[in-house]
Amino acid sequence: MTLAIFSSDHERVRACFRLLRDLRDRAVAAHAGLTQLSMGMSRDFEIAIEEGANVVRVGQAIFGARPTGNAYYWPGVAEQ
């Protein structure tokens, strides 16, 4: 599982997901049972699916925003 960089730049986000997919693809050679690719959250799940995710986390899309802001989870990042 991975979370992408917290950015509105879709190509930077996509690069994170592409890296994990490539790592998973290499690992499958040694462990054929690896079938899940968990990446993406409410903010970027569409890109994650395009890059091969078959498990996504969409809690905020269903339940609404967390009581704490994004800066709490990604320190040093301005609210976006």
Image (cartoon, rainbow, N blue to C red):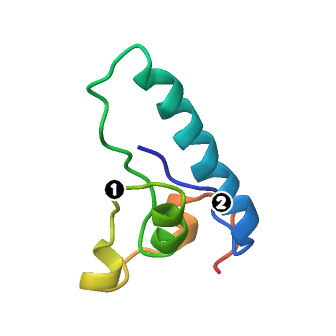
Question: Dot 1, how many residues are within 10 Å of its Cα: few (below 14), some (14-19), or many (20+)?
Answer: some
Q: Which residue is mark 1?
A: 54
Residue displayed at 55% across by 31% down: 23
Residue 46, position as x, y percentages in the image: 49, 73
In the displayed structure, does residue 24 sit left or right of residue 67?
A: right
Q: Amino acid at mark 2?
A: Arg
Residue displayed at 63% across by 41% down: 19
Residue 36 figure quarter: top left
Residue displayed at 33% across by 64% down: 57
Front position in the image: 27 or 11: 27
Count of labels in the image: 2
Question: Dot 2, how many residues are within 10 Å of its Cα: few (below 14), some (14-19), or many (20+)?
Answer: some
- The local secondary structure at tag 2 comes to helix
Residue 56, position as x, y percentages in the image: 35, 61
Q: Amino acid at mark 1?
A: Asn
The quadrant in which the C terminus is found is bottom right
In the displayed structure, does residue 73 sit left or right of residue 7?
A: left
Q: Which mark is residue 14?
A: 2
Residue 25, position as x, y percentages in the image: 50, 32
Q: Which mark is residue 2?
A: none
- The local secondary structure at tag 1 comes to loop
Front position in the image: 64 or 40: 40
> Does the rendering let one see residue 43?
yes
The quadrant in which the N terminus is found is top left
* Above/below status of 35 relative to 12: above
